[in-house]
Image: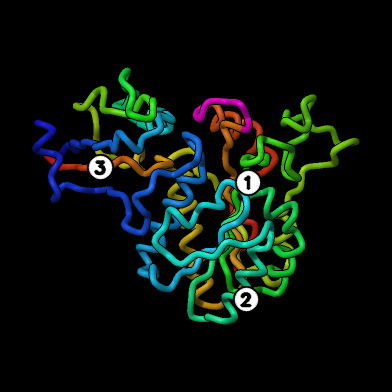
Amino acid sequence: MALKGAIVVDTEKCKGCSVCVVNCPTKTIALTKEVNSKGYNYAYMAEPQTCTGCTNCATVCPDTCITVYRVKI
Amino acid sequence: MDLKDIIKPENLVYKRTKVLTDNVMHYCPGCSHGTVHKLIAEVIEEMDIQDKTIGISPVGCAVFAYNYMHIDWQQAAHGRAPALATATKRLYPDKYIFTYQGDGDLASIGTAEIMHACNRGENIVVIFINNAIYGMTGGQMAPTTLLGMVTSTTPYGRQADINGYPLKITELIAQLEGTCYVTRQSVQNAAAARKTKKAIRKAFENSKQMKGTSFVEVVSSCSSGWKLTPTQANEWMEENMFPFYPLGDLKDI
């Protein structure tokens, strides 16, 4: 049984602190080159196929802007 | 598997708690305050005590904490949050009262209030954010600043002969009879944040059982005050803060 996950980032709330990037065990998350309306590079799934939905990123996000989904396949 | 097959309501495993408001926090990127606010809000949601919780916000960066949680709040004068919490708890013994204080607030100007509130064993929860610096006012030296640490008022590093020694206030508080639970935690990674959440939950449950004062210190980073990026600040904290402020329970009865 494998786990597949996905995250949805509230891009306007994200401040691009990278704490989720270093806490992602599968190196799924990176910061975008584009910026949001406040000028921050926000987090996104750079490697969506590797996400397991472990919720580490959402747990450490200081601005609580990450929602996590997970399915068993 | 396509993303739209995963992102469905039935597959949801983590979402922002409803106890947090929709306001964007004014804290700097990567600030530990946001993470601790979230953990407190999640504990309040899990224990279903949203309408019974009163928070006391301090003076410091967290002075605006009342903007971020849908609970009742009071804002205390600098360092006086434990005094206000004492009054609130005695007037409303069935409510859950917590203070949320930084190191400049709790360990400096508010030392008398926190010592005596803990010594009296008031049934309150104290959340103590220790980032070893005055973050809000521009990174000045705090009582908790480490020896050799550069701040805007100690540009050559803190020296013991001029500035004295860093204050381990949590160790002092652990000696007081009135406290039932004294612990030191951190939130720089997911494992640490989950442990901190458990500690906060335990503190609120102690308050319910009227066991005495529960004191949760969270060793935090201040990337703006330390002049580092958020991830570098977390690494600096692990290398320099944790040897002096070791994590773990100091007292649990």
B213 displayed left or right of B151: left
The quarter in which the C terminus of chain B is drawn is bottom right
Residue at 48 percent across and 50 percent down: it is B36
Are both tags, 1 and 2, on one chain?
yes
Categorize mark 1 by other alpha carbons within 10 Å: few (<14), some (14-19), many (20+).
many
Nearest to the eye among marks 1 and 2: give it: 2
Q: Nearer the viewer, mark 3 or mark 2?
A: 2
Helix, strand, or loop for circle 1?
strand
Residue B127 % position (x, y): 57, 57
Query: Which residue in the protein does label 3 denote?
Result: A68
According to the image, label 1 marks what residue? B130
**Badge number at residue B87:** 2
Label 3: how many Cα within 10 Å (few below 14, some 14–19, many 20+) = many
* Residue located farthest toward the right when viewing the structure as drawn: B161
Query: Distance between the Cα atoms at labels 1 and 2?
Result: 25 Å
Kindly identify the amino acid type of the residue bearing the numbered disc 2.
Answer: Ala
The local secondary structure at tag 2 comes to: helix
**Amino acid, disc 3:** Val
- The magenta region covers B225-231
Q: Position of residue A49 (x, y in %)?
A: 19, 26
